[in-house]
C-alpha cells in the first residue's frame, strides 16, 4: 500500500501521445473533477477513486489531448518546426526524409500543408497553430512522406501507418473543416 492512501499509482503506466509515462492518482476526496499536469518526464492524471477502469482510460485520453492542445498553443518558430520534423522523420521514417526548410505560411487557407520535393521545402498553414500536437505532427509527417513518395498512392499511406495517431488526426482535421462549413447563426457572431 502506498504511504499516502490518497495516492495510487497504476501498476502498468499508460502511454500518452509522447513517450512519457502516465501516472493515475485516485482520490476518495475527489468526487467529480479530473485534472492533469506534467511532472518531470511523466503526466499525472488525478481522478475520483470511484471511477471505473473504462472511465479512467477515457479520461486519461481526454486529459492527454487537453494537455497536448495547451502545449501546442505556444507557437513553434520555424527553427523549432524544422527540428521537430527531423525528430519525426527519425522516429517514423528512419531519418530518410530530410527537409531543407519547414516554415509556417499564411497563404494556405484550403490546405493544411504543402511540400515541394525537388526543393525539400515544407510549408504548414498558420491555421494549424493552436491545434493539438498530434495533429501538427501528423501534417508534418504527411508532408515528410511526400519527400519520399510522390502522390497519395498505397506506398505513401503505408509510410503514414507508422504514426499511430494518423486516423485520429485526420478525423480532427475533417471535423475542423466540417465545423467551418456549418451555417453561422446571427447570435454567434464575434463582436
Image (tube, grey):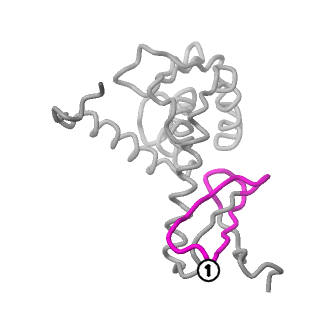
Image height of 90 relative to 76, above or below: below
Residue under label 1: 28
Q: In this view, does 156 lie to the left or right of 178?
A: right
Q: Quadrant where the N terminus lies?
A: bottom right
Q: Position of residue 100 (x, y in %)?
A: 66, 17
Helix or strand or loop: what does disc 1 sit on? loop
> Is 16 within the magenta?
yes
Q: Which residue is more in the foreground, 116 or 86?
A: 86
Q: In this view, does 20 lie to the left or right of 49?
A: right
- The residue lying furthest to the right in this view is 3
For the point 80% across and 81% down, the residue is 2
Q: Is residue 29 left or right of residue 94?
A: left
Image height of 27 relative to 15, above or below: below
Q: Quadrant where the C terminus lies?
A: top left
Examine the image and state in which quarter residue 70 appears.
Answer: top right
Q: What stretch is highlighted in magenta?
A: 15-42
Amino acid at each position: 500500500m502506498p504511504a499516502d492512501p490518497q495516492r495510487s499509482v497504476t501498476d502498468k503506466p499508460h502511454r500518452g501521445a509522447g513517450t512519457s509515462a502516465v501516472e493515475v492518482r485516485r482520490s476518495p476526496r475527489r468526487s467529480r473533477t479530473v485534472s492533469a499536469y506534467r511532472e518531470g518526464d511523466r503526466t499525472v492524471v488525478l481522478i475520483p477513486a470511484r471511477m471505473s477502469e473504462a472511465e479512467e482510460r477515457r479520461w486519461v485520453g481526454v486529459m492527454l489531448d487537453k494537455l497536448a492542445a495547451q502545449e501546442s498553443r505556444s507557437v513553434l518558430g520555424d527553427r523549432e518546426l524544422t527540428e521537430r520534423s527531423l525528430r519525426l522523420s527519425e522516429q517514423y521514417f528512419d531519418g530518410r526524409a530530410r527537409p531543407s526548410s519547414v516554415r509556417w505560411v499564411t497563404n494556405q487557407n484550403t490546405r493544411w500543408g504543402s511540400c515541394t520535393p525537388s526543393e525539400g521545402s515544407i510549408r504548414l498553414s498558420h491555421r494549424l497553430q493552436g491545434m493539438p500536437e498530434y495533429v501538427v505532427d501528423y501534417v508534418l509527417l504527411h508532408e515528410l512522406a511526400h519527400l519520399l513518395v510522390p502522390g497519395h498512392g498505397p506506398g505513401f499511406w503505408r509510410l503514414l501507418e507508422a504514426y499511430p495517431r494518423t486516423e485520429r488526426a485526420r478525423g480532427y482535421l475533417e471535423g475542423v473543416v466540417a465545423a467551418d462549413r456549418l451555417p453561422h447563426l446571427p447570435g454567434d457572431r464575434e463582436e
